[in-house]
Amino acid sequence: MDILKIEHLSKIYGKGDTSVKALDEVSFSIKQGEFVAIIGPSGSGKSTLLHLLGGVDRPSDGKVYVENTDIYDLNETQLAIFRRRQIGLIYQFYNLLPILTVEENMTLPVLLDAHQVDQKHLDEVVNILGLQKRLSYLPNQLSGGQQQRVSIGRALINNPSIILADEPTGNLDSKNSKEIIDLLKLFNKTYNQTLVVITHDDRIALQADRVISIEDGRIAKDEVVRP
């Protein structure tokens, strides 16, 4: 089943002679449970693509369907709620709130929905991430690898349909990078969550089920690495 479907997606920044086409008529689909790596040189449009898939930015043209919902048919409030519940976003620089503890940062998406935290699920995620002894810590009391684990926990707390990670290891050393990718793969396999990772690291890309190469805002190659 296709959980994510993109049709003729384009993004243009600016107007007239100064306009820049970051994405140009991109179309593809991703099946539930797939691990897809999106690669390409700096400025190729891969991060723009991820932001459009996650509902963080709006396209100039085209459609993005998540579980058959056209996310850009939603108004801003509806889109924010949908994104919070259905899409887990992980960034290179963590984006944790410095005044909140590890537990508060992880459960923030649930609390913003005014829902009760599923303690069993939280405990399970915390245990897998190895953060049991860090729940009361503030972000500045954690290492980079630990902060990225918190951001993964936050992305997973609502059991999203899709996890989108933008260079999740770009700010980490090789040991922490391997641990973070291993964790993402574990959640991908354990919960059958669709995983889309933007990366410049070929070693990470080759662990994916499929690799999509972006060049000059277009898909240059779409290869299945492992069926």
Image: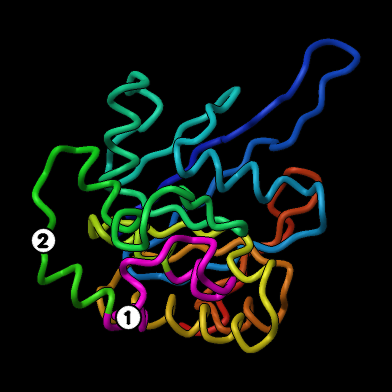
What residue lies at 81% left-to-right and 27% top-to-bottom?
20
Q: Nearer the viewer, residue 115 or 225?
A: 115
The residue segment tinted magenta is 127-149
- Could you give the CA–CA distance between mark 1 and mark 2, rounded to whole angstroms? 19 Å
Residue 167, magenta (yes or no): no
Q: Nearer the viewer, residue 73 or 79?
A: 79
What residue did someone put label 2 on?
A: 118
Question: Where is the N terminus found, in terms of image quarters?
Answer: bottom left
Q: Tell me which numbered mark, 1 or 2, is placed earlier along the sequence.
A: 2
Q: Position of residue 186 (x, y in %)?
A: 37, 83
Q: Tell me: 156 left or right of 25.
A: left
Whole-percent x and y of residue 74? 32, 23
Q: Amino acid at mark 2?
A: Asp
At label 1, the amino acid type is Lys
Asked whether 104 or 47 is in front, the reply is 104
**In this rendering, position of residue 98 left or right of residue 119:** right
Q: Which residue is mark 1?
A: 133
In x, y percent, where is residue 209?
Answer: 50, 78
Q: Locate residue 158: give its quadrant.
A: bottom left
